[in-house]
Image (cartoon, helix red, strand yellow):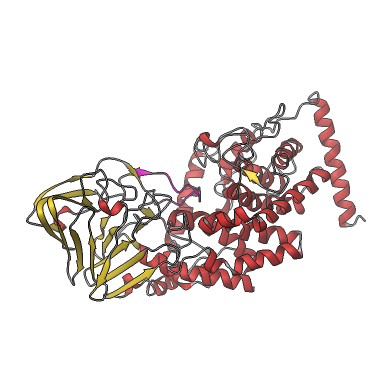
Amino acid sequence: MMNRREFLMSAAAAQLLVSSRLRAATGGAVPEVPPFEPSKLKPSDFSDADLDMPYNLTYLPRIANSIETEGPDRGFINISVWRGTPQLHPYNARIMESILTLAWFYASRRKWNQFYASPALRARLELAFEYWCNSQSPDGKFSEYGVQQWNLAATAFAVKFISEALRLLKSGPPIAPALHARAIDCCRKAVHATLYDPDLLSHGKSYSNQFTNIFAGGAAFLSMYPDATLWARLKEQVEASATNLQSPCGYMYEHDGPDLGYTLNTHHENLQMAYHYWRGTHLGEILIEEENRFGKWLSMNILPEPGQPFWVANRSIECRQQHAIFPAVDTPLADRCLIMRAFATPPERRAEQIHAAREKMEKQWPQVDSLPVGEFSALSPYVFLQRAHYDWHPTAAQMAEARKLVRPLHEESFVEQLKDTREPIVFTYVRRPGYYAAFASAPKVISAKQRLGLTFIWTPKNGVLLQSQTNGRETAWGTSAGGALPVEATGLDADYSNGNTVVRYPLPGGGHKSVTFADDRIRVTVERDGEIVERVPVFDPACVVSTAEAKAGPAPARRYGQTPAPCANPEAGCPAVEGPVPGKTLSVVELRATGKLEYEIRPA
């Protein structure tokens, strides 16, 4: 009777024999992966967790067969199904993250996976691994934006995706032993570069979602291939993350400021993967503490839109992406981080989503949606990243209890002010019985996209009322000084009084402006020489009351935000839709006066 080692050796030998016969049959050419054959399957063969697999199975051969088999780019995955057509370049290691897609099908034994241990898929996976290894710098880094333009993102993301691929291969069918060993060594070098290279470390402090890939990938890699030195260094970086990566306000640094898009997508993917390995350990506790701080920040900056399956965002403070709304936030860290349960997908909605996906599959079987080649995440490797990782979802009762921790939902009157220490930016949040408002001030904006001042007003009954638009011109709240942008687009040096409910700041070229948060309304006064133009982006123009000359109309048609459907691509967000908030029309109320302009915003 063979032991496990003998069995694996015999299996490897059999695979090599099959591969050599296949190459001989094809004249030495790299064989193509055959099409998916669904004739022996039926929809009921797929579990609820695998309802996306018919789509993935259908297009796996197309991706595998797109791998270059000759020439200088031999091994490059030459199809735009991840990162979009503009990024499809042989020097871009991010494209090669789809190695995980190939490895998942090659190494995952499932009744419906005809590609398990496929010799043709193995041959192409080996080509891709060899290309990936060859593209690494001598000190372990990878490039993204140009030939040998090594950067943190390409290096740290490689650790995350390749570590999961190596996990699958560790106990799965074999690839060439020397190549497998080389891939492990290349991944180890990438871990070392991410943790030690001074330029990557410095960059990571400003772009936390990029750096926390090493929490995810490092946890996975070192669980398989221990290294005491790398482990000590990783532990040191995780322990320093509370100050290196996270603002005292609670947000994770992105371009040194807040950006919910990257944090709720990429960073949360990183946390989930790391938590799978560190749950119940010292490092797992650090992740929970970080998530608790972030959850409190999140609770001040997204709120539910009544009757809708999404949350509206205090968006114009964001520094990188542009998202007016967010779908539910599901994270397994909510098993310990109570406040994050408040943002989860309700159990009945998850059941509805599963039912709809199964109904669609059964109705169109064996047909699947077309592959949108060229789109950013036509078939993303993220689909395969978390399938074996720890998952957890709250009950409806747990969600209801967690909503009590969301202050704007549970309290009717408070003022809270948060200040960052890296940048001189101040966030003020005012809750009154009829409304909730956010105001942001800084002598200069952190990012050119930011629009400061009165950024957000929400009411319990009607949801979002005012939402200043990220990177907006006329759609951003503020005073025009004759240019295309409001003066608040470059920053404002504010003074606060009366318990931080009165804000006053000077205007460029003379004059000043004040905002007063009263119990039932918000009063704004602008004084300066000459004509004053004030723009107020609201979803109900009737809430703006003034004796000044006024006009109101829908905001110019643009593509804002994201759909409320679950994101397939954690980095790029969901597809955009017309208008910032589905079901509502954003109008810009424009007020004009000379010398002095006064108006009120009266929430219904």
Quadrant for the N terminus, please: bottom right
Span highlighted in magenta in the image: 565-577
Taking the view exactly as shown, the residue that stands out farthest to the top is 27
In the figure, residue 66 lies in which quadrant?
A: top right
Quadrant for the C terminus, please: bottom left
Residue 574: x and y in percent read 44, 47
Q: Is residue 571 inside the magenta stretch? A: yes
Taking the view exactly as shown, the residue that stands out farthest to the left is 547
* Residue 258 showing in the rendered view: yes
Taking the view exactly as shown, the residue that stands out farthest to the right is 1
Q: 89 or 219: nearer the eye?
A: 89
* Residue 341 showing in the rendered view: no
Which residue occupies 36% across, 67% down? 300
In the figure, residue 195 lies in which quadrant?
A: bottom right
Which residue occupies 39% across, 64% down? 424
Q: Along the horizontal axis of the image, is 170 left or right of 377?
A: right
Q: What is the tally of numbered marks visible in this picture?
A: 0
Magenta region, mostly helix, strand or loop?
Answer: loop
Q: Is residue 329 inside the magenta stretch? A: no
Residue 437: x and y in percent read 27, 65
Residue 492: x and y in percent read 29, 59
Q: 50 or 63: nearer the eye?
A: 63
Q: Along the horizontal axis of the image, is 596 left or right of 462?
A: left
Q: Along the horizontal axis of the image, is 465 left or right of 265?
A: left
Taking the view exactly as shown, the residue that stands out farthest to the front is 509
**In the image, residue 30 above or below residue 51:** above
Which residue occupies 31% across, 59% down? 305
Residue 24: x and y in percent read 83, 27
**In the image, residue 476 above or below residue 517:** above
